[in-house]
Amino acid sequence: MGRNLIRLFVDPFLGAYDRFAGAVPTLAAALLLLLVGMFLARAVRTIIEATLGKIRLDDHTCRVGINEILSRLGLGKSPTFIFAWVAHWFILMLFIVSAANAVNMPVVSEMLERFVSLLPAFISAVLILFGGLLFGRLVAHILRNAAAANSIRGGSIVAAAAQTVVVAAAGIIALEQIGVRPEILISAIQILIGSIGLALAIALGLGAKDIAAEHMRELLRPRK
């Protein structure tokens, strides 16, 4: 009776100890994977920063206005930092997925694997949008200079409109790249453009009604 009572209290602790002892190698392997991933990610980040620093990438991108666009987007002023940061976390996420698989956490592993699989498409979308911003800025700059050189009024408005169209087109392509169907956005843009056009037409009509009336009187005046 006494032995049974003792075993009643001891067996749960022994079972917990056995499960813990059996899980120690797996936990150690997962921890080792995380440590290796952190070390490798940090090493790759340092190498990228050093390499891009030697070729003075930030100075070259600053001359063409890339750094200013990055700053306006809230991504910082250094393309070198962005490349190094993306590489660092991409490598680290791969090792986190491996560690999650090692400790038999399929939910976490599947989520991270899905994120890692979407990362290339996301990077492509960001690059497309970034290229659209640069091209839109270039088009706006050319239009402003052309308007100024030919003494044409309204050059800034035309340049801003052209830049907006280019950026919007790049944004739609970027959304398609990550699998988002932009039909609703396209419809909204079409409605917005139509509304702006209607408003401009009404404003022009109201502002030029006296001129239009004068022309109509000239046309309808009987000839002698």
Image (cartoon, helix red, strand yellow):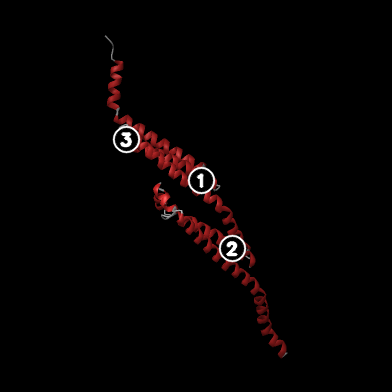
What residue did someone put label 1 on? 174
Quarter where residue 136 is shown: top left
Tags 2 and 3 touching, CB below 8 Å: no
Instruction: Name the residue type under label 2.
Output: Phe
- The label nearer to you, 1 versus 2, is 2
Q: Which is more N-terminal, label 2 or label 1?
A: 2
Residue at figure coordinates x 29%, y 21% from the top left: 215
Residue drawn 44% across the image and 40% down it: 166
Looking at the image, tell me whether mark 3 or mark 1 is earlier in sequence order: 3
In x, y percent, where is residue 30?
61, 68
Tag 2 secondary structure: helix
> Of all residues shown, which one is farthest toward the top?
224
- Amino acid under label 3? Ala
Q: Looking at the picture, which amino acid does disc 1 mark?
A: Ala
Q: Which mark is residue 193?
A: none
Q: Is residue 176 above or below residue 78?
A: above
Q: Which mark is residue 95?
A: 2
Pointer 2 or 3: first along the chain: 2
Determine crowd level at label 2: few under 14, some 14-19, many 20+ residues with C-alpha closer than 10 A.
many
Residue 76 relative to residue 44: left or right: left
**In the rendered image of this protein, does residue 167 appear above or below residue 46?**
above
Percent position (x, y) of residue 154? Answer: 32, 35
The residue indicated by pointer 3 is: 148
